[in-house]
Image (tube, grey):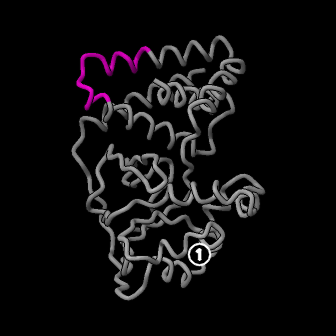
Amino acid sequence: MKAINILMGSILFLSALWFASAHNHMEAETTTMESNTIVDIAVGNEDFSTLVTAVVEAELADTLSSEGPFTVFAPLNSAFANLPEGTVEMLLMEENRELLRSILTYHVIAGDIRASALQKGLSVTTVEGWEVRFEMTGGNWYINWAQIVATDIIASNGIIHIIDNVILPPANMSDMEMQKEMLEEILTWEEMGLVMSFDRALQNLLSERSERIQGMLINRVLSTVDIALSTKELSISQQNMLTYIKLHIELM
């Protein structure tokens, strides 16, 4: 119980700390490949073989070879391997092409975004339509819950940044509400009490702040929750509470 309280407290502490801190910028070496498209670079790197297969299956190769510019957050093969067993095979089925396309385009932003342009709390709309959020923790940049492990690979039609996890677009509103209701049935009274305590603390943090500042704080809390959920040390109870908190905030 003490560990759970510490975890919940840490989320708010980190959010407030990040809000008060100055912007940090990633320092990374730049690799220039003037004549290669994003697809050419991916095809030439065996660590992107799963991504290349998915791009071809989703019929996006021509789009990502076009003029652009595009910024692509490219998951490594190991990132796809982190998905639940059988997920990749399911996504590559012809009947799931639209779902695969949605996931892949969630990793693509129209325009040229270098590492030097990243800012804490920055939200950017993807080609898929949903926003992604950028945060820094422990000296590392994250896009949602995926760590950016290499940056600024320059293609002739854009930029590639490498990430260590596949990021998934949010579920639609009705699915999110259903998930939240299911968690309400699963969480114990004690766990719900902790969640409600967190919610009251969050509301106090947001109170009497401008809409813009509220949006920045909410984005940073969500990013912190995503990063926490990506760790393997959480108990099922902690995962359920954090997932509930995330859904609660997104449905606010």
Name the residue located 67 percent from the left edge and 54 percent from the top edge. 83
Q: At which x and y percent is residue 112?
A: 31, 66
Q: At which x and y percent is residue 104?
A: 55, 60
Q: At which x and y percent is residue 91?
A: 70, 59
Name the residue located 37 percent from the left edge and 71 percent from the top edge. 68
Say if 144 sits above or below 80 in the image. Answer: above
Q: Is most of the magenta stretch helix, strand or loop? A: helix
- In this view of the protein, which residue sits in the foreground, 104 or 226? 104
Return the residue found at the far bottom: 35
In magenta segment, residue 14: no
On the rendered image, what quadrant is the N terminus found in? Answer: top right
Magenta residue span: 200-214
Tell how many labels: 1
Rate crowding at label 1 as few (under 14), some (14 to 19) or many (20 or more) other CA atoms within 10 Å: some
Task: Give the side of residue 137 with respect to residue 22, left or right.
Answer: right
- In this view of the protein, which residue sits in the foreground, 212 or 118? 212
Q: Is residue 129 visible?
A: yes
In magenta segment, residue 212: yes
Q: Quadrant of residue 238?
A: top right
Q: At which x and y percent is residue 98?
A: 64, 56
Which residue is tagged 1? Answer: 47
Task: Give the side of residue 18 with respect to residue 1, left or right.
Answer: left
